[in-house]
Image: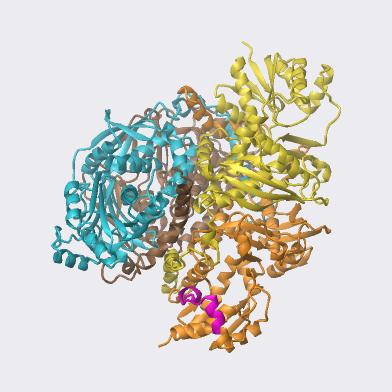
Chain colours: A yellow, B orange, C cyan, D brown
């Protein structure tokens, strides 16, 4: 019996050609699946029709922006997820929501193979395949570009030969992946890491060096989730979209970095994530006010490991889930307001306000109302430093140092 | 026999009065010790003379800026030390170099007590006392303000009564600590954490929102230490000073945060550290290019623990020293150049260049010269994800989820 | 208004005298609270009466063995809690259940002070006071022995003078704390850490070097909790008690260690915890079979931090609670059976069986049924080692090493 | 030009056949390399001659037991290396010393390929190949059994056809790897993890349940290395060998575990490591006496990561080297004596003695000589618990829980 293949379909040249290519190479029917995670571009319905025109026996499209925001972006926000302390996992998290819809489609249509369009060099192939095997351990994965020798040249030739309804001439110099959480750009001249990015690379953000008026915003969080902007209720998706707009207009959220890929190489990446960076900045600040010190210190390590796991394609792994349980527990008091100025490429917090605050004015103040009992300090210091003192006394005793 | 007390002397009202106060309260002679760590203000010789005029039997002053830069700021730079991911430990590291000179003086002059001017509420008392006990476990510590009831009012009264050569009238609304690595400010109206700082608070940095031309700088590092700026050789101290100037002129390095003190309370702090932030940014970037991935991942945890230890007054602890051994080992290839644009409050890296780079153009490129063997990926992904797949298969088998 | 003091009452000399002593020193009424956590000795009712006879205005006693087992020992088991990789936190966890009853009594009877009998040198004072402040932040703590100068000599004198119904003559050479989770012993001659313990020290365990028949036991776990022994259903308390008996009879669970106290000193401790060690051994083994690798690796770090927090008196801290959320998530598949031989001081696992097992015979076997695809390995190794290889190539390129 | 292959040669059937097999399959000449790491069995000279008789153009053998003990076992001891808290990395560390000699031979004889006899399912292939690429990034790796289809059946057929001087009839039911640091056994009936091992499996250790007299031993360490046993100087190799004898005679060091392999599967392993376990036990105990608390706490995490890296084949990775720098720093005071009783399968420490001890009798004792200032405790506890108290007060204030 012939296999049925569910294909992660973008509407672009490579995956449009892949529909027929897979059929030719493997004899399998292809079902195309596309999801709108905020990547912009063509209408989903246009994409659905193209898949059918290219030979798919079925094409499934869906607006999954809210699902993506609520179930993937929000956990990343609460985790404080910044891979290598910088990258908000823009592409990394989007693969997982797509995987979910791919596997759902495979189950619904009885497919036994899932295909994606990644090459063999990046992180995304890992995220797709590990995710697919996690949600559908019985499914097989194929990657036409990597496994079935579907090169770009062959794709163009195939598309032209079969008159596929897809443009083959224009090749952008940029390799781009974008969604509501941000935008990733790679391009040839930036492979020389001494070269600086040019303005042309950016789309979500304005040039931060251009003079313009600052924008002050007040974000309200409830248990670690943004629930209002300037007092007006928002969903997670709206929060990201509005801040993409406002922080993007101020040039906030540009990143230019050399990144450690899971496959063992370093690569140069440009990101824009104005909404994500604004939200992460505000959320982190609210945590400094509402999380107890030792919890906050430990959460940094959890945050790092969570980010590495998700970057490494292990969103659906048991460790990721157990870390989620930890993180969820930490968010119960991350409730309150953050005032932030967006300007000149920076999102700067200028105020915090929370009923859940652990900041205690009466303990902190140097004014007369001070309730901190300073006499406690002497004993504290003595015992806090005792083991170091004993260590030093040993050095002295043994004539060391 | 009367004790001899070595006093950490600043030249200000509190410690000037403390000289006589300690004598009155304990009968001990006082030796004043002051070190120039770049705090600016009065000449060290003036300070020395004032100590003697206030009754010190000896006064020792020294320019320890280079020592501070080389032995305290440089390790902090190489550690990537940012407490709570932000604060470059400005005051925290300066206490240790002062402690060293206090204990040296105690040993030289046969003193058995060391005194400092801190209150019982902050971190600095811990850093002083734990440091003193580490370098001189046989020494006793006292804190006149905390232990001998030397309040501000009593200090003014005492100074006027004894006609001490120190101004008592002007009381700055700001509580300030500064050195070459940065500047810390606390003040009454900022104890309300909803209030934003005003320009008046800052001294090391210009207003970042004012329009001005950007400043491009090239930093050269050798084994993790800055050795040249724009091709001109610099010492660590010169690197900090020049970048304080240039990054400060662009408003780089302002921090406004709610901080977890060691004594268990949260406090609001304003910092300026233009040179430190510029150096840390460049150094971190050079590490992304020259450190192997797993080493870089682990170093983040080491960096956090190092920062916590130093913040918590444990500079001289055995764990801090062992972490130093780890960090030193990581720096052997942190050699190369970073190009950075200083502008509008931001220090943005635009280029990296290093013979020690692990970035491999031929592996990274999507061009035809690509040497990465993509066929390796399939096996890698399969085994990378196998344990997650088995976990998922169990869920499915047991009918879970 | 006079304070009312709730006193952690043991029925022994010190706390019996404390009832009157507190009244004398502070004018406060005393309510005695005692809980049976399996420490053995006198009947709870006898203890209650003695408290009243010694002057308490109220005395509350309760059998809290099941509560202790379910809510304190079980989390410790699931955490795999071994402080310094060895000590199962025998005394550390018992303080928390007692604290809970002390604060409940304070709330019920409107007391505003809680008193305990610890000295100022150990860990237990910290556990009591931090716990009390966590559950009753408005309560004040006092420690008669430490704060009100109630020395042993004074206690004997006081008891005799007031004819308190408590023996004052016999002073055991051993300082003992025991409950169902184990037993802790300190004694003078063991303060020389070169001295070996003698048989006389032990009570929960038989001499392991005596020849006797081995005892084979099968433990059944459900989601990380023991639910049956040799096929017979048990509660957590029964599991501990039965294994105290059976493992104790084989000399299992003796510990002799030099321990890092929270107050900064090292102390010599002897513990016996036959049931705890047998359970921890079996539970850990079931985890090796049912936890995915990366989850298991991370859990070791969580386990260590959990143990340190609990040892350090931070049972009720927010970090401990967030770690609990992580741990609970890990236990969902820790279900199955462990066969163990108890003999000669050792609890040795000899078999594991679980529907939730991740051990896959068909992947693991070297027999012909093998389903592991060995061709995957080459690609895996290549990419797993790539960053190390690039690092080495750099060394070679630069002529290093 | 034909390749020259350096082959990791054991003298057994598979690698003996591989010599000719590689020649047939690839046309390459083969140089056999064998090292004595204490695996016992045939004389190295016999093995060398067999390699030549099987067609190797060169055969290199060496006694590398001391090198293995000093440069591989000792770092493992100082790291406290126990993978999954149990396995002392017996096979894992031996691969690295062999890799070093393979690469040295490749460099000496101008070979460009290195071959090993591992299958595609285990950890050892990873250790060989990653190690080889680290020390010789320019070298290619092949695995005849995995890559050149050299199955056991083909090996027997080939050996008989070519009359190779190697026995082909007897096939042990056990798959064994052994060296001076320990012995690993896998076998068919133990692939059912409910089955217990039988005595027949063991060779380095006697049955611990047999009654015999205990053996008391005193180990002297200097900076973390064993330097004397019962007062008689030993090298690291002698220490291991003597303790293999003495601890083995008492049944110490047997392990039966389900292990997480790097390739993603769980496997059942039996180990014997009497000398390693005795040394690790004594060394860890000396650390409890000589390491400061925070250093000891952090070292546990370092130890775990070190063990995982080495287990995962990353001995030569930069992170492993940086962790070595940390560990070396920790060992400077691990000097002193440990008295230990070996008996009934257990190595039990009964005494510790060290000039470098941080245990302070005068601080620890409850006797009258006590120098610990108990009045320090109150302040310490107050501030130690303050952040937890504030967290609890918030709960109360908000009416939570």
As for residue D38 lying within the magenta part, the answer is no
Residue A106 position within the rendered picture, expressed as x and y whole percent measured from the top left? 61, 19
Q: Name the residue furthest top.
A: A1
Residue D194 position within the rendered picture, expressed as x and y whole percent measured from the top left? 35, 29
The answer to whether residue A146 is seen in the rendering is: yes
Question: Nearest the camera: A77 or B288?
Answer: A77
Residue C391 position within the rendered picture, expressed as x and y whole percent measured from the top left? 64, 49
Question: Nearest the camera: A246 or C297?
Answer: A246
As for residue B147 lying within the magenta part, the answer is yes
Relative vertical location of residue C274 with respect to residue D172 in this rendering, above or below: below
Question: Nearest the camera: D28 or D338?
Answer: D338
Relative vertical location of residue C274 with respect to residue D173 in this rendering, above or below: below
Q: Which quarter of the image is occupied by the N terminus of chain A?
A: top right
Residue A401 position within the rendered picture, expressed as x and y whole percent measured from the top left? 49, 72
The answer to whether residue C193 is seen in the rendering is: no
The picture quadrant where one finds residue A312 is top right
Question: Nearest the camera: B269 or A20?
Answer: B269
Callout count: 0
Taking the spot 60% from the left edge, 33% from the top edge, the residue there is A71
Classified by dominant secondary structure, the portion drawn in magenta counts as helix
Report whether C169 appears left or right of D198.
Answer: left
Q: Which residues are magenta?
A: B142-158
């Amino acid at each position: 019996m012939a296999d049925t293949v569910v294909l992660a379909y973008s509407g672009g040249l490579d995956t449009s050609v892949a529909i027929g290519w897979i059929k030719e190479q493997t004899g399998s029917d292809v079902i195309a699946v596309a999801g709108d995670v905020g990547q912009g571009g063509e209408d989903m319905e246009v994409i659905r029709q193209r898949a059918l025109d290219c030979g798919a026996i079925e094409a499934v499209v869906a607006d999954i922006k809210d699902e993506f925001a609520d179930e993937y972006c929000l956990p990343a926000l609460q985790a404080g997820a910044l891979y290598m302390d910088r990258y908000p996992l823009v592409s990394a998290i989007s693969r997982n929501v797509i995987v979910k819809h791919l596997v759902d489609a495979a189950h619904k249509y009885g497919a036994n193979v899932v295909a994606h369009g990644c090459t063999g060099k990046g992180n995304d192939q890992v995220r797709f395949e590990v995710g697919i095997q996690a949600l559908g351990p019985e499914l097989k994965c194929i990657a036409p570009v990597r496994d079935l020798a579907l090169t770009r040249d062959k794709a163009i030739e195939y598309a032209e030969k079969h008159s596929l309804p897809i443009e083959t001439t224009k090749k952008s110099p940029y390799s781009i992946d974008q969604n509501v959480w941000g935008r990733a750009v790679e391009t040839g001249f930036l492979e020389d890491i001494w070269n600086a990015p040019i303005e042309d690379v950016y789309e979500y953000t304005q040039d931060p060096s251009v003079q313009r008026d600052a924008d002050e915003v007040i974000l309200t969080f409830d248990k670690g989730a943004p629930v209002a902007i300037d007092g007006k209720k928002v969903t997670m998706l709206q929060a990201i979209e509005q801040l993409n707009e406002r922080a993007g207009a101020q040039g906030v959220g540009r990143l230019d970095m050399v990144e450690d890929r899971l496959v063992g190489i370093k690569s140069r990446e440009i990101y824009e994530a104005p909404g994500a960076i604004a939200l992460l900045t505000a959320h982190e600040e609210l945590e400094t006010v509402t999380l107890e010190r030792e919890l906050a210190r430990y959460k940094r390590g959890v945050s790092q490991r969570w980010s590495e796991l998700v970057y490494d394609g292990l969103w659906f792994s048991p460790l990721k889930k157990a870390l989620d349980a930890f993180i969820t527990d930490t968010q119960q008091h991350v409730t309150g307001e953050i005032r932030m100025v967006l300007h000149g490429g920076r999102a700067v917090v200028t105020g915090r306000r929370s009923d859940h605050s652990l900041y205690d004015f009466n303990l902190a103040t140097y004014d007369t109302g001070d309730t901190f009992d300073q006499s406690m300090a002497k004993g504290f210091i003595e015992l806090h430093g005792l083991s170091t003192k004993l260590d030093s006394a040993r050095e002295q005793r043994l004539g060391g140092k």
